[in-house]
Amino acid sequence: MRKTRSGPVSLVEHRGSRRRRRTNPIALAIVATYDTMAIMLTISLASPVPIHDQLVAGLRGLIAAGQLAEGDELPPVRQLAADLGINLNTVARAYRDLTDAGLFASVRGRGTIVIATVERAAGPKVEERKRIEAGIAAALGDAKLAGLTREAAESMAARQIERLWKHA
């Protein structure tokens, strides 16, 4: 049972040394608050992964984990951008991409809300499965290059499967 929502809130905390030096800055934003919990979104400004991609992946991850459900409101573009310390066009583009994927919708008077927890298929299922398999292959390749054993990689994959499908 979900707790009652107090509306979209967004706060930020910057970690690392001075923000200008950006040695290891991490921006955290509260995407949604409930009576008993807050949902955090983390962006690493020092990561080689583009901020837009981190934002989209973070929001998809929150939806996949069940932390954002249908009907949940997201913070306004300007507020989330200011709290993360990033350009508002980056946040707007991420919201637009997730709207195009069928996960978000902009509703007059309510802002951006989650309308689905499953993406609308952009193409044939075969292409979607190939894209997902390529992502899994890349992650497992990274694990092997990092020196993880097969058992450790299988354990990590099993934990993520359990985390994402525990409610299914």
Image (spheres, grey):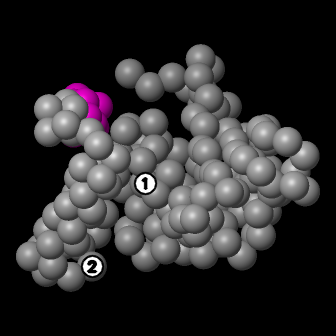
Please determine whether, in this image, residue 112 is positioned above or below residue 63. below
Residue 163 place in picture, x, y as percent: 29, 31
Please determine whether, in this image, residue 97 is positioned above or below residue 63. below
* Neighbours of disc 1 within 10 Å: few (<14), some (14-19), many (20+): some
Our reading of the magenta stretch's main secondary structure is helix
99, 14: nearer the viewer: 14
Say which residue appears at 60% left-offset and 75% top-offset. 93
13, 139: nearer the viewer: 139
Q: Are marks 2 and 1 in contact (CB under 8 Å)?
A: no
Say which residue appears at 29% left-offset and 43% top-offset. 147
In magenta segment, residue 6: no
Task: Identify the residue position indicated by label 2 in the image.
Answer: 122
Give the SS element for disc 1.
helix
Please determine whether, in this image, residue 103 is positioned above or below residue 158. below
Residue 140 place in picture, x, y as percent: 23, 52
Looking at the rendering, in which quadrant would you find the C terminus? top left
Residue 167 place in picture, x, y as percent: 23, 30
Task: Identify the residue position indicated by label 1 in the image.
Answer: 60
In magenta segment, residue 160: yes
Give the SS element for disc 2.
loop
**What stretch of residues is rendered in magenta?**
156-166
In the displayed orientation, state which residue is furthest to the left: 126
Amino acid marked by disc 2: Ala
